[in-house]
Amino acid sequence: MSPLSPLRLLLPLLLFLTLAVSKHTSNWAVLVGTSRFWFNYRHLANVLSLYRTVKRLGIPDSQIILMLPDDMACNPRNAFPGAVYNNADRALDLYGNNIEVDYRGYEVTVENFIRLMTDRVGEDMPRSKRLLTDERSNILVYMTGHGGNEFLKFQDAEEISAFDLADAFEQMWEKKRYHEMLFMIDTCQANTMYSKFYSPNILATGSSALSQSSYSHHADADVGVAVIDRFTYYNLEFLENRVKDRNSKVTMGELFDSYDPALIHSEPGIRYDLFPGGEEGARSRLVMDFFGNAQGVVVDENEEGGGKGKGNETEWLEELRKIEEMIEEAKRRHNESLRVAPQHVSVMEEVIAREEEGRRLKRSEGAVKVDEEGLWRKKAVGVAALVGIAGIWAAGSWLDS
Amino acid sequence: MLSFLPLLLFNALIACTAARSDYHERLLLRPLPQSALLASFTFRSNESSGAFEEQNFRYFPRSLGQILQHAHTKELHLRFSLGRWDASNWGQMPWNGAREGGTGVELWAWVEAGTEEEAFSRWLALTNALSGLFCASLNFIDATKTIRPVMSFQPEGDHHNMSRLHLLHGTLPHEVVCTENLTPFLKLLPCKGKAGISSLLSGHKLFDASWQTMSIDVRPVCQKEGDCAVEIEQGVDMVLDLERAKRPLDNPIPRPLPIEEISCDGSKPYNAPDTCYPLTRTADSSWSLNEVFGTSLHGACPLTDDRDGNSHTVCINVQPEREIQVKTAGEYDESRSASETLRCYKLPVGEAFDLVLPEQQMTTGLVLPTPPLYAARSINGHGQERGSVQAVIRNPSTTDAVEFIYLESLPWFMKPYLHTLRAVIDKSEGNPVKETYYRPAVDRRRGSHLELRVVIPADSSLSLTYDFDKAILRYTEYPPDANRGFDAAPAVIRLLSPRPPDRKGVYTRTTSLLLQLPTPDFSMPYNVIILTSTVMALAFGNIFNLLVRRFVGADEVPSRRGLRTILQGKLERFKSLVKGP
């Protein structure tokens, strides 16, 4: 038998797994707080609570984009240095000792958020600040802050409108940047924010209807401000109590059914119509499809069907051989470059010329020495010129008269 | 009185070793006056330059190594700092200030490039990559915040092609330093904060310190020709207030002690049993590592190279008679050196380790090394149009003159006038400024850069002043919290003489400045829009009226009396419509 024969057993299994579990192969989370200043502590606590939850359910830091517009943990007003709490019992320190904030402070702007979502970033942008998703990625987008009818304020300085957001998501869809998206927003009149969406495969939920405020849950007397919002609090309560581990089969429908307007003090909204399968399809999705990390694998679809097994195997072997050749070639090239120690004379000359040029340019950008004597000479020249001009004028007026 | 071992000596103790791949770590504890504790963590690892070029990393962090290679950076210095070093109480800074940074984030690096433009584009690549690695807004170091110091910094490493190296320097004085910066810092260490002295570092205590600085230095080190290594030294220096640090994490708010636990001054009269004049405590207070750092030390990092007698990782610099109890279940070793003022401990592997210092009445005190200079800087003047900066630098030495470089990097919206620069020495005449380098600011493109070489005679102080104008920013250039003010970076002072003991140099920094700029009322544009709209509506309405209406005299209008006249009028209009013109 060929050495690849276990693959033949594995392949159908993998296919089965992919079809049975879900169609996405990675999970990403974009968690955005949009409020600055200490009294908005609860918005950062909201975001950090979601951050802890998705991390608990398996999404790694490299696939979480966390945007925190202000620093609460190391804020001089914080009586608990290095800690952020979302409950007055202070059982869980949300900041902890292992946290990676991708965008912080002044970096949290509408422009940066839209650039992140649509991946229109500069060439030097590090990978940790980019949303490197593809058409098989499920994305959880969570936003919280102060908002109103069809807008959400960023840092009390600018706004993102529901139209901007809808257009950004459409661009993402056109660029095949997501498979399915759960949009969750906790702000005043939150449901207006998703009302303008028109791209497919988005499931959206918000904390309050048009002209309704979204309220905080409770305050901590020692922290001195409210620590969490109601909608987020009850979402977290559900996620903590019902979604205990990564094998959880709890559906989104159950999560949505747990929303109680009497407790949340506003009417949470859910938008199903953009999702494939409508309400039924959306409600049957697992919570883990958005809050957890998928381990699914997708095998190329043209390899489906039993008869091609042998053909696939030879193809694979062929590919492996090609890769091996490429590695050999790279190694050979590397060794060759090592062996060529003395560089060509002309190259060396070029380098020296460039170095000299560099030396010449070097001073052009730096500070220039201020010469005291030169300063006096310049002043003397200036005075002489002025005196000369005055002399000419005097002479002219004297001749004229 | 006992003279205490200067940190200098300690510095020599962990002097760099051979150019091979190895890892060392060291923690130095040193009580300071007023129940403060200085803790200096040093983590150093090497990688031979050959292995570094081939990306074979053993202890050197791969993530940082690849960034340095990508940005062609040969030497890198990165600082995250918080708080102020109280030089009048705590004396000379640890490591002569060479590991200190200005408040916020400070970065300087030697980038290899052929041209100035190439160097700058690589510098931008470096700052962006580091911003991703360290979760800091280092990408905000753009052309306006970058300077090219002439005299203030010297490379610490051994470089072969200095002509192709470009020194660039940038600061972010407003940058917050918090746990998200510590997390990647610890991840660069071989033991990742899980074992060894790094297990003591947690954000809860580090960012509650009176002063702290996290530093990363990467430099090439050559023993002899061709035997080179890339060395990374990570350091954390912090001054903890012992009373504050001892508060438990879950209950850090100080509450009054019950009166039974307070020792009251019996010599004073009391009018009630629940009143008390507390006695000032004279004894050195008790503390332990676990208490002060909030976590326990999980034994030694097994990757530490324990050859060359570098295995004693935790050192404490106290009086010889100070009692220290060691609490561990594993094997440890104690050694004393430098006339017994330095006690070092070899940590057990895999067992928790704790040092407990009980309360003790000490008869001898601490002698702290005097700093070579005291520097303070402030903004003077009033109003939102202009101001002036005054820096007062004092030379405490009674015998030696001090020569130093003074570097200012100002934001573009703070425009100094060089002709107003005055340097006055209080006890002597003459110009103390020997050399001046200056680069004026260009609006929105670069900041000003001022470098002075100054000599202060013994036992005198220098007052340096200059005036500046405050620029008016555009509406969109204001940050969201514009009313807080804008930060100006700390001035960097580098000592030239007395000669620094090593290549790292002797540095001091002033604090950063908070600059109030004229800040508009941000709702003003909306007022303007509303007012303009009103004016336009009024004007437009009138003109529109004039254009579309026909104005006739009152007597020309047929009088409307009763329904009959109206009907007649309608009928006539209808007739004329039917007939046509």
Image (tube, coloured by chain):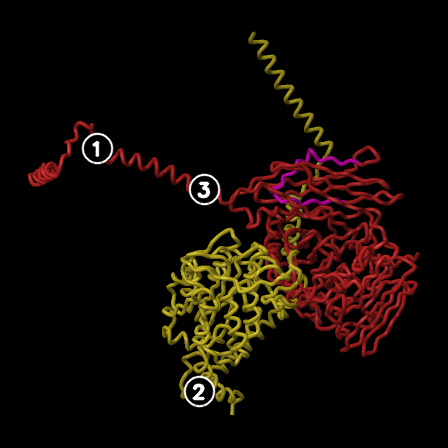
Chain colours: A yellow, B red
Q: Determine the image quadrant of residue B545.
A: top left
Residues at circles 2 and 1 in contact by the CB criterion of under 8 Å: no
Give the image location of residue A365, x and y in percent. 63, 45
Q: Does the magenta run of residues contain B418?
A: yes
**Mark-to-mark CA distance, 1 and 3:** 36 Å
According to the picture, the residue beneath numbered tag 2 turns out to be: A309
Query: What is the C-alpha distance between the residues marked 2 and 1?
Result: 90 Å
Mark 2 nearby-residue class (10 Å; few <14, some 14–19, many ≥20): some
Callout 1: chain: B
The three-letter amino acid code for the residue at tag 3 is Asn
From this viewpoint, which residue is outermost toward the front?
B271
Letter of the chain that mark 2 sits on in the rendering: A
At 15% from the left edge and 34% from the top edge, which residue is drawn? Answer: B560
- Secondary structure beneath dot 2 equals helix
Q: Residue beneath label 3, please? A: B527
The stretch in magenta equals B405-424
- Discs 2 and 1 lie in a common subunit: no
Q: Secondary structure at mark 3?
A: helix
The three-letter code of the residue at mark 1 reads Arg
Q: Is residue B185 left or right of residue B578?
A: right
Q: Is residue B170 visible?
A: no
Q: Nearer the viewer, residue A267 or A338?
A: A267
Instruction: Indicate which label's residue lies in the foreground, 3 or 2.
Output: 3
Parent chain of label 3: B
Q: With respect to residue B456, does B284 lie above or below? A: below
**Which of the 4 image quadrants contains residue A82?**
bottom right
Residue pictured at 40% horizontal, 60% vertical: A210
